[in-house]
Image: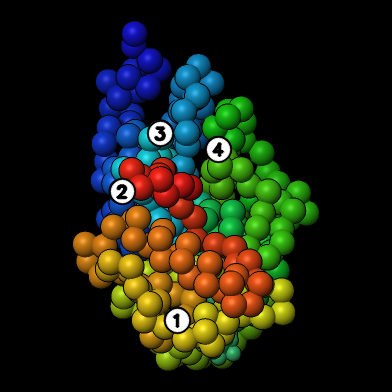
Amino acid sequence: MITPWDELVAAGLIRELVDLAPLTTYKLGGPAHLYSEPETIEHLSGLALAFQRSPIPILVLGRGSNLVVSDQGFPGLVVRLGRPFAGIETTDELVTVGGLASLPQVARSATGAGRRRLEFMIGIPGTAGGGVRQNAGCFGSEIDDVLVDAEVFDLATGTLSTLDRSALDFSYRHSSVEPTQVVVNARFATEEGDPKTGLNQIKEHTRWRKTYQPGGTLNAGSVFKNPPGDSAGRIIDQLGLKGMSVGGASVSEKHANFFVALPGTKATEVYLLVEQVAAKVQEATGIELEPEIQFAGSFRDESGIGD
Ligand code: EPU
């Protein structure tokens, strides 16, 4: 039987078995069963129609900077917005960006244009869409502090809606954006300010990250959310777990809430390290650390390790 997905493959709108590793900062994991880079809302509508006729798991991918894809890949459709969604436009107090816009580029562009408040985004190596979905944050600010509204396309219903900040139900590293929803646009509020002061602030942030975070390695940022009133990195460090490893994945010597991977590391190794560190923290402190990075696909294998 020919599925709506086969039709989209035949029409050249989606591709099969696309390697996801290069699309993530960890550079590991298997392929997407189906992969699409929609360039227009019409393309997204085509995907929604197929989804309604034949639902399959959906993974919306941004920069892949907070993601571990299973070694078996993702058994459904991976949607990554195409280039037309990478725009950044500054008009007076509003900065309007496409879902694919890079947050560090948003920081530089808005700050250079004499707008302040978005400098913190220099520390978030992701897309605007991913940042909204995750309510990403750095240097004491988060997306929630500056977002005015976001345009969201829902692949499950085929509808495009503008959701204002309150409708997104933001909390620490959380929003109400569902797995089938694609953030296609976001508007941020800014204040007028001296570009030079703003760009200096950006330089300062960049220096801080270089000093305290393991840049230049394969990683996906903070592995765990910080528990209320404490820091996952501090807790893991205090238990002496820096350097602990499973295969090619290890707890960074520089920052204990970053798990770095050597080239060739398996996604399962990262998964097991996350599980083992969480178990040690739980055993020693009673604190249940919750992963901040997302795992996509199945992490179940013959040894019975489950996801
Ligand atoms: N610390 C240690 N040992 C370590 C790491 C940290 O003792 O190995 C201590 C630090 O000395 C500091 C405290 O833990 O006193 C907090 O560490 P840090 O300032 O590095 O911040 P964090 O809580 O680990 C958070 C965000 C980061 C963000 C930084 C800077 C979370 C989970 N992480 O990290 O976000 O870059 O603040 O604002 O909220 C991310 O989300 O991926 C991410 C990197």
Marks 2 and 1 in Cβ contact (< 8 Å): no
Looking at marks 4 and 2 on the same chain, the residue that comes earlier in the sequence is marked by 2
Q: Using the rendered image of the protein, determine whether residue 51 is visible from the camera's viewpoint.
A: yes
Q: Which mark is residue 68?
A: none
In the image, residue 4 sits, relative to residue 17, either above or below, namely: above
Q: Which of label 4 and label 2 is nearer to you? A: 2
In the image, residue 68 sits, relative to residue 254, either above or below, namely: above
Q: Secondary structure at mark 2?
A: loop
Dot 2 corresponds to which residue?
71
Give the percent coordinates (x, y) of residue 31. 29, 43
Depth check: 215 or 182 in front?
215
Looking at marks 1 and 4 on the same chain, the residue that comes earlier in the sequence is marked by 4
Dot 1 corresponds to which residue?
241
Q: Which of label 4 and label 3 is nearer to you? A: 3
Dot 4 corresponds to which residue?
180
Mark 3 residue's CB less than 8 Å from ligand 1: no
Mark 4 residue's CB less than 8 Å from ligand 1: no
Dot 3 corresponds to which residue?
76
Q: Which three-letter amino acid code belongs to the residue tagged 3?
A: Gly
Q: Determine the residue located farthest toward the top in the rendered image.
A: 1
Marks 2 and 3 in Cβ contact (< 8 Å): no
